[in-house]
Amino acid sequence: MSAGVTDVHGAEAGPFVAERPRISALLDQAIASTAHPADGSRHGPIVLVSAPANTGKTSAVGGWVRTLRDVSTVEVAVSPAESMERIWRRCHERLEAADTRSAWAAGQLSPGGPSTDFADTAQRLEEGLARSDRPVVMIIDDVDRLTDPVGVHSLDTFIAAVPAHVAVVLIARHDPPMSWHRYARDARFTRLGEDVLSLTAAEIRDVMLRQHTELTDGAAERLLFLTGGWAALVRVAANHLAGRTDIAGALDQLERSPRPVSDYLVGDLITALPADLFDFVSATAVLPEFEVDLADTICAVDAARALRGLVDHDFPVIAVDPASVSRSYTYPGIVRAYLRGELRTRQPAAREQILTTAIAWSVRNRRNRTAIRLALDLDDDRVLEATLLECGLPMAIDGDLNQLLALLDSAHTALSTSPVLPLLHALIACDTDDLDRAATHLDHAVTLAPALGRPHAQRDSMVHLYRTLLVQVSARLRVRDVAELIPALDDPPADATEDLAIVGLIAAGVGWRAVGEHDSAERRFRRALALAEGAARPSLRVRTGTELAALAWYRGDALSMKTLAVQAMSLTRTHPIGAYEIARCASMVAMADYLLGDSGDTAGSAALPFIGQLHEPDAVGALTELSDLIATFDGTAGRHASADRARRILAVMLADDTAPVPSCVLLTSVANMCLEVGRPDWVSEVIAIADRSFGPRPEVRLASAAVQVFHGRWESARRTLAPVLRAVEGLHPHTASSVWTLEAAVACELGETRAAHLALDAALGVAERTGVVAPVVEAGAAVTDALARDAGTFGHLDGLADRVLSLATRRDRVHHAHLTPSEMRVLGMLPSAKTAGEIAELLSVSVNTVKTHMRGVYRKLGVGSRRDAVSVARSTGLI
């Protein structure tokens, strides 16, 4: 490092200053990454260190400068109203002191006195920089003091043309009006802001250690909260804690603003503020954080102008999340503590009024977490209960379940006897499909407020929420018959929010769907969807679209199910939606693909998340997980484990569900999974549970016949299916298709060609109306052979028969492909863009060997190209 004179860093030097290796590393990275732009620019890098006063900008840059080696440094600080001619002259003097080689003689300024033309002075500095054969770092502090437009233009022009071996570091309290966009475009510019410059907890511990005060990690984190990481406030805290043994007690005193802190705040910060700015910071310090619009509401001054004024007065204002669209601000903890104390002394009632106003603003503007946190600070039980009731529902809808749970825990002491807490816990349990826990919370709510459970209870938001949740739970669990409550959800009370009204309609639709009133259910869902669109609530649109897709499934209309589910899923790519809702919607898309035979076709559902990537096992609802297991069974590597998991979930659903759809309908698919892995005993177990819950339903007989077919008892299977075939017209389409397909399989084994053809024709007819082809595709080699034999004899269904035959043939071929380990290794390489030669090199075999394995893969998968082999292998789980 050069011996150049420094007038920048002395003010903040001292033992309290932490070593800032993090900042030094960022500055090194900025200089290195911009020193050689991709376009070959001959100009050097520019770094702007921009943050308010007292954040340690100058000391951080000074610490970095001390790490430099073999670099000439030029360091100046701009004085108020200083001329650019004087700034350029001082830069030249620093550069001359940094490098006293004789080559400077030609470039020295005239000793005859200062020039009146700063352009000439700047040009001489540029010439001197150009002659230097060493890297140069120019540091100009307090650039924000440069207010003369001509001077700013001169600086902008100068740094735009500095040579490649010169790096310019500018330090300012705010961004001066220069051509930053142009420098960024040329890959020369890096900005380090307040978020980077704030001291970390580790750096604060370093500061204290230099003062011979050792902090624990917890104490350092607390001090970080109190100071916001601002260097000046850390200095105050360091002096306060020096020599103390009771660190926790000293931090308590610091939070209550002891005398040393008060003296600093009053002497250095508060007295410098005009009266209007003092009133502004006193009011906004009541809030943990505030947005500009909120500050406008609670203060009598323009908040944006006030914030600019605070920056001009070096007051420590912290941007909570600079990247957020709705930017929030706060003050360091000890500053807030002092201001709150002052406000309590001067205006005892002001705090309550400010918090009440801020809660109302937050509710109106859907700042739900903020509203609840403010209500907790207000310490008014009635306001807290009302705020939780109004804001808890949209938080759950938007997927903020963990945050809502934390807020409910914070409110437990204040509202231990209020039904709002168990109602919101029941809401969270419903949204995570934990219906047993939801029922328990609803019982607790009625214990606390018996009026909730009365059929003629006074209608208000709390009663409406209770009935909404009760209908949702009772539609799936054998809790109670709530048919009389469903119509009441169509007419929400006057105080109900839009969200509560929409959720009530969704619950009414769920209730009508559970009792088989599908048209009534669709009307409620469509009305809820219209309201959600009008209210611009994408989370509710996804929820309603998923319920409509599920309704289409209950009706057996796989085509509509796919359309509705994909439409809902598209919203999850453009709006923040809760993970549980995404999982439900994704499972509907996957199930529709499975029913339609589109599992290998990603055109309609490309880039959909997999359920397993969203949640751990048991963390999603039973129906969601079971749907995913069924839809992905053919492509999964662990088919045995998948079938076992599916039958366990179905057993619980069959025991709890109030209606046979969807659990009994899914019995057919789960039975097929269990038989595929050779476990007919698992099927017998779930058949027994279904029979106890719903009696001898067609699906129970169908699963029993499938077990008989598995054991080769064809005649017994025919007798078991006979009563189901006589009533097949009224069955769910999935069940009907499965019945006809199993009848076709039995007929094929018994040599009844005509009966097999008629059964397949009937199954194709179901597929034509509803899109459900999965039972035929999964039927096995005998049915596939019958389809091939009868090709062209199905009349207007011939096209559909050809498609089903293609899907079934591909599935059968893959299931019996039995690729060798070598072929599997080659298959795993095919999705890449590597040539046969490159694959051979990676596998350490000859090119001819790779080509032989590729031909074997193509033959066994029944394809003729690499692209088709990859498509088939992906759709069936081979890769």
Image (cartoon, helix red, strand yellow):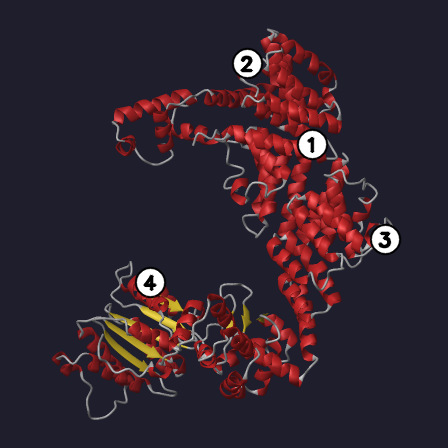
The amino acid beneath tag 1 is Leu
Residue position for label 1: 654
* Image location (x, y in percent) of residue 656: 71, 35
Q: Secondary structure at mark 1?
A: helix
In the rendered image of this protein, does residue 346 appear above or below residue 374? Answer: below
* Image location (x, y in percent) of residue 566: 58, 40
Label 2 Cα neighbours within 10 Å, binned few <14 / some 14-19 / many ≥20:
some
State the image quarter where residue 536 is shown. Answer: bottom right
Q: CA distance from mark 4 to mark 2?
A: 66 Å
Mark found first going from the N terminus, 1 or 2 = 1
Label 1 Cα neighbours within 10 Å, binned few <14 / some 14-19 / many ≥20:
many
Residue position for label 2: 782
- Camera-side residue: 443 or 331? 443
Mark found first going from the N terminus, 3 or 4 = 4
- Tell me if I can see residue 828 in this picture: yes
Mark 1 or 2: in front is 1
Residue position for label 3: 457
State the image quarter where residue 872 is shown. Answer: top left
Residue position for label 4: 187
Q: Are marks 3 and 1 in contact (CB under 8 Å)?
A: no
Mark 4 or 2: in front is 2
The amino acid beneath tag 2 is Ala
Mark found first going from the N terminus, 3 or 2 = 3
The amino acid beneath tag 3 is Ala
- The residue sitting at 61% across, 83% down in the picture is 342
Q: CA distance from mark 3 to mark 4?
A: 68 Å
The amino acid beneath tag 4 is Ala
Q: Secondary structure at mark 2?
A: helix
Mark found first going from the N terminus, 4 or 1 = 4
Q: Residue furthest bottom?
A: 112
Q: CA distance from mark 3 to mark 1?
A: 33 Å
